[in-house]
Amino acid sequence: MSEVTVEDVLVKLESLFIGDEAVCTTQLASELQLEHQKVVGLMKSIQAAGDYVSVADRVKVDVMLKPEGEGIAKNGSHEFVFWANVPEEGITQADAMKSIPNAKLGMGKALAAKWISKNKEDGKIYKAVQVNQSQYSQV
């Protein structure tokens, strides 16, 4: 809608009401294809004009993962990814840094958690813990 009037908003509000259920301005903005702030301004105008609507302020918080969080949710923590990519025969630190995503952070945390260990004799990194896959169900 290019130019939305107060009347347009009232008509749309009437169509959205189900019983005494409230209508959220974000839903109204979506229905009217307007920016949320524009709808809030229109609602304040309607409220100021008389006893047409009852308005209550609410705070809505949307939480979204950033790309790094999405990666962790999908693949596991940095230390898990590092641990999971250490082969049974071990890996040199230089090779790990080249081939494992976020290796520097993952290696530090995996070492601190004692999931991996560095062998001083051959200079390789090895898994220090093993996981019994049968203990875990597939999600």
Image (tube, helix red, strand yellow):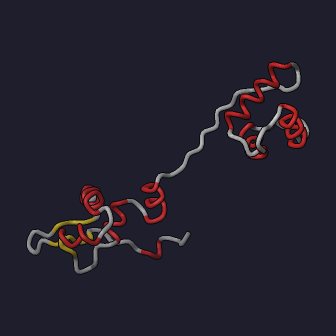
From this view, report whether residue 82 is shown above or below residue 134: above
Spot occupied by residue 97 in the image (x, y as percentages of width and height): 23, 67
Spot occupied by residue 126 in the image (x, y as percentages of width and height): 23, 72
Q: Quadrant of the N terminus?
A: top right
From this view, report whether residue 5 is shown above or below residue 62: above
In the image, what residue occupies the spot 12% across and 71% down? 123
Spot occupied by residue 35 in the image (x, y as percentages of width and height): 68, 40
Q: Please tell me in which quadrant of the rendered image residue 46 appears.
A: top right
Q: Please tell me in which quadrant of the rendered image residue 87 appears.
A: bottom left
| Residue at the bottom extreme of this rendering | 89
In the image, what residue occupies the spot 78% across and 38% down? 3
| Residue at the left extreme of this rendering | 121
Horizontally, is 136 left or right of 50 in the view? left
In the image, what residue occupies the spot 8% across and 73% down? 121
Horizontally, is 122 left or right of 113 in the view? left
| Residue at the front extreme of this rendering | 2
Horizontally, is 8 left or right of 112 in the view? right
Horizontally, is 67 left or right of 3 in the view? left
Q: Quadrant of the C terminus?
A: bottom right
Q: How many labels does the image show?
A: 0
